[in-house]
Amino acid sequence: MLDGRNWFAPLPESRRRTLSGAVRRGVAIELDGRQLIDFSSNDYLGLASDGRLIAAATAAMQEYGFGAAASRLIAGDQPQLHALESELAAWKGFEAARAVGRGMLLNLGLLQALADRHTQIFCDRLVHASLIDGARLSGGTLHRYAHNDLHALDALLHRHPGERRIIVTDGLFSMDGDVADIAGLLRLAEAHDALLIVDDAHGTGIAGPEWRGFVAAAGCAGHPRLIEVGTFGKAFGGYGAFVLATKELIDGLSSRLRTLIYSTALPPLVPAAMRAALAMVQSGELQPKLAANLAQFLAGSRDLPLLPSTTPIQPLLCGTSEAALAAASQLRAEGLFVPAIRPPTVPEGEARLRITLSAAHTQDQIDRLLAALHRLPR
């Protein structure tokens, strides 16, 4: 008989995930009573603990209270949300935007709103799990093409015609640190009469003209065939997500995006804080420090087994899950927190340490990380 004690088959030690209470303060993280330097977060600009965000959130709580208390289509639609959406759309170069609770919710709902059983969906093999899950839940036919291989995608598009087709990619891939050929993908979308979705969660705020991300860097912002997804949980240092597209498509999503319709709206403090974060991202105040930290790391890591990346995501290949766990444990013993990423998040044989850099790291902290990485077994 199956019950809660034996429902799941036991996992080998190298595959088990555990939760441990962590306290973050800037780039310091407290785990199991020890304070470590954190090289794991997506807080690329160090805004998660910035006093200006805290002040904006506090002022919003004092004015509006804490919770939104309802979904946006009932009574949770706030002026702060509309102001944030207008500012995002203008900055990103799109006609309209819509903010949603978080990236996972947005991507799950987005594919279901756009696709049905008559839709062909073509996903890069390394897109975020939320996009794969959204495609599967949509009822459309899912095709996965070899990572960043436009020739393979073109062949798939020729083999699978349909009235409605959607190409799906990340902008900056979160586990490999490389970037999609967004302009090339958009050319394929035009040639095959398809829609293109780009999740640029990790690129927004750190790349492109005016730090608008890799869609803007490719010169594709605002194209009527392109939908851009982003989050506030990376460079913005906050919480929540947004989608950008034509006004007609955003209006349609407002009535079809089930993860918006049936979710409580973001608390007023979140859009207030994210408007403050947007202003700081636009100012370009913090990105030069991030670029300097990245340059320092790349200069000191040329002989390490890193995947090729010029972004703050720097994956160091270890091979087996056991090797990745051992390397993470050795770094933790030296006061550094760098997580081991293992299958099924990455392919078998490609377990790794996922190193992420922030504008908040000091030169001494990066030197300490580099020295520790060079002491790892080869």
Image (cartoon, grey):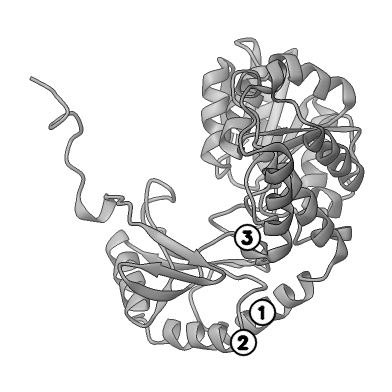
Q: Nearer the viewer, mark 3 or mark 1?
A: 3
User: How far apart are the alpha carbons under marks 3 and 1?
Assistant: 18 Å
In terms of secondary structure, where does tag 2 sit? Answer: helix
Asked if 192 appears above or below 168 in the picture, the reply is above
Asked if 353 appears above or below 130 in the picture, the reply is below
Residue tagged by mark 2? 363
Whichever of labels 3 and 2 marks the residue nearer the N terminus, that label is: 3
Residue tagged by mark 1? 293
Residue at image point 54% right, 61% down: 41
Residue at image point 35% right, 66% down: 324
Residue 42 locus on image (x, y percent): 59, 59
Which mark is on residue 48?
Answer: 3
Image-based side of 253 in relation to 173, left or right: right
In terms of secondary structure, where does tag 3 sit? Answer: helix
Image-based side of 271 in relation to 17, left or right: right
Q: Does residue 17 appear in the picture of this structure?
A: yes
Image-based side of 4 in relation to 243, left or right: left
Q: At label 2, which amino acid type do we have?
A: Gln
